[in-house]
Image (tube, rainbow, N blue to C red):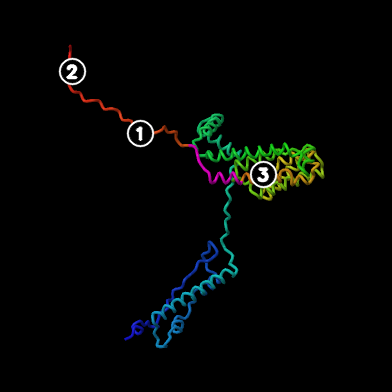
Amino acid sequence: MSLVSNCRLPLQSQSSSRRIVYPSPAPHRFVLTDYHATCIKVTSVKPDLQSLLASFDGDGDGQLTYAEANQAFAALQVQQTLNVSEAHTSCAQAPSAPSPVAAVSAKRPTPTTWDLQVANGFRAALARGESPMAALLSYMASKLNNKGTGRAAASDLLWSFVGMFLAVTALGVMNLHVRSWPVVGEWHQQGLGLLLGSFGTLCVLIFGRPEAEAVRIWNLLMGHVIATATVLTLLHVLGPSILSRALAMACMIASMMFTDSVHPPGGALVLMAVDSAAIQKMDWWFMLYPSLAVTIALLLPLGIAINWLKRNVRFDFPTTLSTPDHGPVVEPSPSPSSGLRPKMA
């Protein structure tokens, strides 16, 4: 008897009537609608196993070799995968039935503002039987006696120091020679200073809080455009006055909040533009220079370099100050008593 005749598999097979019920795509639903029942019927349809196996029977004797059976079972798996994929696609494209259970939207946690933090601290102090002044002094003492849980690493302190020093030094050197620069030198000769107050706030954010939302590229660019465009527009309409200053600041903060681009240095730009005749002579050029141009050309590249150093060159203060180890100190053991007495003369 040949090997093939010994390796025959009968074509008879028994199909299971068990149905696979897939969960409904709509959450919190326990009632099957007609639409869901249709999806279940589609996913429950199986190919005709008898005809599929017969198509791989090469000699037509009603039996399969192991090689033919493996090919048939592989084709069966492919067919079942296609059926399930088509069923899921049809279920996803069909309109879902409205859910009888109303979806409860999760409330976003509201961050605690500074005034609530102070009020909560005073309430906790009163609950402990402390006076507000004692609680304030205790809070300040806990911050001064920081053991390192909220303190920046030594490397972060060093690189922030270096970044701030280099940025302000570069601005000071540029301010000495900016009057001789082409194009912009005329504005500086009329009283425009390069050391704007907004640069101080921006440097603190770039080198001290680089992860802050206020120094994202969107906040930096959009916040600058909103601040300068708002104040210049109101200066053209109302001129420099108390009303134009107040309206510019109010419109600026509302626009920044609406566009999710709150940028604190923008407030300094608005106040400087209202009170500076040199900026008013620049007119719309103030949107590009000096704040935006110097930020892009100097502060951002320097901030990128400092952030790279903070990520890749890290070190911290030693946790404990230990004395140098000179090895164990071995004390001489007392010599055993010999029982001898000094000889008396």
Q: What residue is shown with label 1?
A: 327
N-term mark: 2 or 1: 1
Up the image or down, 66 lies above or below 217; here it is: below
Residue type pointed to by label 1: Gly
Helix, strand or loop for the magenta stretch, by majority: helix
Q: CA distance from mark 2 to mark 3?
A: 89 Å
Q: Residue at x 57, y 63 (%)?
A: 99
Residue 315: in magenta span? yes
Q: What residue is shown with label 2?
A: 341
Which quarter of the rendered picture does the N terminus lie within? bottom left
Residue most extreme to the front: 345
Image x and y of residue 257, in percent:
68, 47
Up the image or down, 61 lies above or below 156; here it is: below
Q: Is residue 46 left or right of residue 163?
A: left
Residue type pointed to by label 2: Arg
Which quarter of the rendered picture does the C terminus lie within? top left
Q: Mark 3 and mark 1 in contact (Cβ < 8 Å)?
A: no
- Could you tell me which secondary element the residue under label 1 belongs to? loop
Look at the image and give the residue range highlighted in magenta.
304-317
The quadrant in which residue 209 appears is top right
Image x and y of residue 263, in percent:
67, 45
Q: What residue is shown with label 3?
A: 298
